[in-house]
Image (cartoon, rainbow, N blue to C red):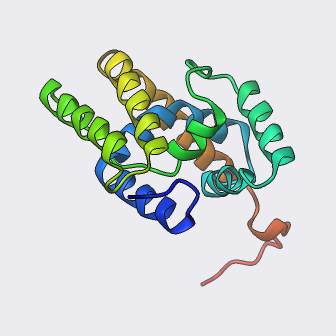
């Protein structure tokens, strides 16, 4: 049985959740990721994920991150709590369409994990069940639209980065030509 407060068990559960159910995590956080990218020039999504992960130990940091996320403008921003986002953003696998049978199989597995605590912490299973419900509610109607938003955010990020001077050094054309 996995114990919620054991760091090793948390990592085992997180790894299994990422491998087995990561598509729910990515889909649940797609718009948050896009909003974050649009809002930030100097901070990477990896740094943001780390800030979320470690903010659990610092209530002041958690409060600031919760306020920051509340102020980002993206649809369905009120669906997941900070604790749920903290977990879901850590897991991500490609989002491919799932059949109703696959979703039901995932639901049964997660409910079994909630009762038996085999490879997933109960808290992780509960969050994944909520993300699974979110998938059922939004995936078919919104995935393509949301991917356009995510791709636009990435394109804007790459545009900003390509315009930024390397190492903040002003490049001066002194008129020399190479042969």
Q: The C terminus is located in which quarter? A: bottom right
Point 37% across, 47% down: residue: 22
Count of picture labels: 0
In this orientation, which residue lies closer to the viewer: 97 or 59? 59
Q: Residue 160: x, y in percent?
A: 68, 47
Residue 47's place in the image compared with 155, above or below, is below
In this orientation, which residue lies closer to the viewer: 142 or 160? 142
Residue 85's place in the image compared with 2, above or below, is above
Residue 137's place in the image compared with 122, above or below, is above
Point 58% across, 38% down: residue: 85
In this orientation, which residue lies closer to the viewer: 33 or 88? 88
Q: Is residue 78 left or right of residue 55?
A: left
Quick one: which residue is furthest to the left in this view? 101
Point 77% across, 43% down: residue: 62
Q: Is residue 153 visible?
A: yes
Q: Is residue 82 left or right of residue 118?
A: right
Q: Residue 101: x, y in percent?
A: 12, 28
Q: Is residue 75 left or right of residue 57?
A: left
The image quadrant that residue 19 belongs to is bottom left
Q: Residue 16: x, y in percent?
A: 35, 57
Q: Residue 57: x, y in percent?
A: 75, 55
Point 79% across, 72% down: residue: 175
The image quadrant that residue 145 belongs to is top left
């Amino acid at each position: 049985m996995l114990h919620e407060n054991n760091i090793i068990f948390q990592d085992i559960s997180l790894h299994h959740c990422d491998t087995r159910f990561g598509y729910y995590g990515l889909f649940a956080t797609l718009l948050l990721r896009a909003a974050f990218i649009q809002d930030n020039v100097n901070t990477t999504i990896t740094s943001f994920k780390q800030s979320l992960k470690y903010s659990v130990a610092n209530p002041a940091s958690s409060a600031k991150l919760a306020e920051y996320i509340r102020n980002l403008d993206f649809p369905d921003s009120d669906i997941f709590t900070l604790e749920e986002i903290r977990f879901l953003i850590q897991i991500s696998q490609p989002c491919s369409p799932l059949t109703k049978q696959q979703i039901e199989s995932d639901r049964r597995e997660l409910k079994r994990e909630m009762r038996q605590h085999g490879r997933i912490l109960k808290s992780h299973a509960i969050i994944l069940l909520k993300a699974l419900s979110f998938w059922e509610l939004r995936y078919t109607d919104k995935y393509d639209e949301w991917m356009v938003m995510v791709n636009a955010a990435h394109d804007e990020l790459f545009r900003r980065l390509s315009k930024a001077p390397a190492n903040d050094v002003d490049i001066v054309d002194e008129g020399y030509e190479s042969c």
